[in-house]
Image: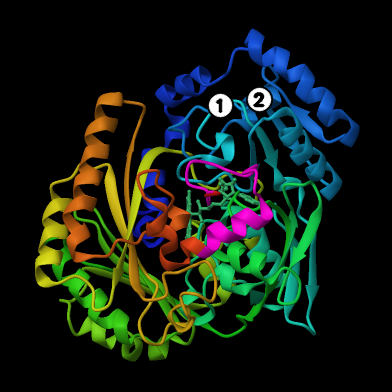
Amino acid sequence: MNMRVKRMTGILIGFLTILLLGDPRFQSSLADKILPASRSLAAGASTIAGCLAPAKARTAFPGSSEYQSARTVFNLRYKYAPAAFVFPTTVAQVQNAVGCAEQLGIGISPRGGGHSYEDYSLGRGRDGVIVVDMTGFTDISYNKAAGTVTVGSGFRLGPLKLALWNLGKVTVPCGVCPSVGVGGHALGGGWGFVSRKFGILSDSIVEAQVVIANGTTVRANAIENVNLLWSLKGAGANSYGIVSQFTFKVHDVSATMTHFSYTFLKSQQAQTVKAFQIWGQVAVAEVTTSLYLDPSGGNNFYGIYMGPSANLNAVLKAFMDNVPAPSNQTVIETDYITTVLIDGGFSQNADPSVLNLHSFTYPTATFKAKSIIVKAPGFSGDGIKTFVNSLQAGPATSYFIFDLFGGSASVINQIAPGDSAWVHRDALFSIQMFTYWQNNPSQSSSDITFIDNLWSAVRPYASSEAYQNYIDQDMPLSAYYGSNLNRLISEKKIWDSNNVFNFPQSIPVR
Ligand SMILES: Cc1cc2nc3c(=O)[nH]c(=O)nc-3n(C[C@H](O)[C@H](O)[C@H](O)COP(=O)(O)OP(=O)(O)OC[C@H]3O[C@@H](n4cnc5c(N)ncnc54)[C@H](O)[C@@H]3O)c2cc1C
């Protein structure tokens, strides 16, 4: 894969460039993660196994090879050691796991795709929990007349997009990485390259089927348990229950699409940021983009326009009028599923069946990420200077992605902040800030300090908000839920007063 394609695929870029899987240092570090079957965990294991046994779900305990492979999640930074993994395929088995966790006083972590930036699905911030791996929930049923699809919460985004494309050239708006899980993604928002037209994924949830703390299953939709549905749409990750199934509204993506990518020079980073935010405010809803920047000079503006390439110059005019000629550019007029392939890091000529994956698409990585939300009109001139000067002084193993959420035409901004738990309705864009390393503790501490300092430097020019799907243990809950936090706490008291579902940044009972 050449550099241009890497840059186009946003978050993939940094992870691919380190290619950890081929690195012998990574392989030995993975071996370090293998948990010895300690006496205390082995003792607990028989009690847990006894409680789980009647439901007949597949399980994995310390000491087994399945346990070792199940411990691999996307961010290799943490080494949580769960007490057990459960791999349910029925709701009754999920109910049994929830009942055992409550009865034995053990924490429980549902897991979808395992992409939590803080690995909350592996241990909710500590060892010794029961991980309920939902990847066995992959039923799908498309209701063409209703314009909805009902899917198990264990689906990953790539297989879901492919299935919907094959079923009727429809989709749900969601993120670019094909191996991200629908479960965690939909419950924390879910932004991707058709989101300015169709909203974030949580906006498309019509109904969720949820196993709640008392072990029963409820449906949350526009008629039943309306407030639970409201809470799940942005604050649903392991705070109110385990979602086993979603019904989503689907959206037509049968029309021609244009994938574009423009590369600029390092010396032009400040100009591209300025142009991105000027243009973003007036961009039509049919276009969604990112801007990738890194200290080595990466400066790439890319995205999807839901229309023919002949219109692209007019669609991007307010951006192009404010930047010099790009040093490189690619414009591909194609169909929706090909844009999914390109953004997923595959060749545009690949057979779409490559999206039908069941494990991580990109090499897993050891990283720290932060995010910040910037509201219109964007950074001031001083803010841009501060951001670009800080990033250019950073380590080569860091990168930054501006994701365009808003602008007056964006559907994301046309929903009121109180209409669902996802509050960031006046965001112009979010910035993802990444730094990664290869198990070198001295590098990790200086890299984390760099990201922390950069975040603090731009904070006065941005907002106090951050995006909960880029979860970062340094953030207060107010950054993720703002004015919706009090209502979320009230709902928590109703649905989970004993705080069965929790992690360090879950909705508290207080
Ligand atoms: C490579 C990569 C690319 C990404 N790209 C994007 C992107 O383009 N757009 C975007 O918006 N985000 C993106 N993200 C962020 C992603 O949306 C979040 O990390 C999301 O939480 C991942 O969901 P998951 O199911 O894969 O993760 P998991 O780690 O399995 O789960 C995340 C959280 O949700 C909880 N959870 C999972 N399933 C359930 C369930 N069924 N019921 C209740 N709680 C559950 C877990 O307990 C955990 O707290 C990306 C992340 C990575 C690592």
3D distance between C-alphas at marks 2 and 1: 7 Å
Find residue 105 and name its label. none
Magenta-drawn segment? 487-508
Q: Secondary structure at mark 2?
A: loop
Q: Which residue is mark 1?
A: 127
Residue at figure coordinates x 25%, y 76% from the top left: 277
Is residue 497 magenta-colored? yes
Toward the viewer: 243 or 140? 243
Q: Quadrant of residue 407?
A: bottom left
Q: Residues within 10 Å of mark 1 (few under 14, many from 20)?
A: some
Q: Position of residue 424 (x, y in %)?
A: 41, 70
Queried whether the magenta region covers residue 27, the answer comes back as no
Disc 2, disc 1: CB below 8 Å? yes
Is the CB–ligand 1 distance for label 2 below 8 Å?
A: no
Task: Identify the amino acid type marked 2.
Answer: Ala
Q: Pointer 2: what residue?
A: 83
Residue 25 shows in this picture: yes
Horizontal side, residue 216 vs residue 408: left or right: right
Q: Does residue 101 sit above or below 336 in this rendering?
A: above
Q: What residue do we see at 40% from left, 90% from top?
A: 310
Residue located 42% across and 59% down the image = 480
Q: Amino acid at mark 1?
A: Asp
Q: Which secondary structure, mark 1?
A: loop
Q: In the rendered view, does 243 fall on the left or right side of 444?
A: right
Q: Of the two numbered discs 2 and 1 on the same chain, state the one appearing first in sequence.
A: 2
Q: Is residue 389 left or right of residue 440?
A: left
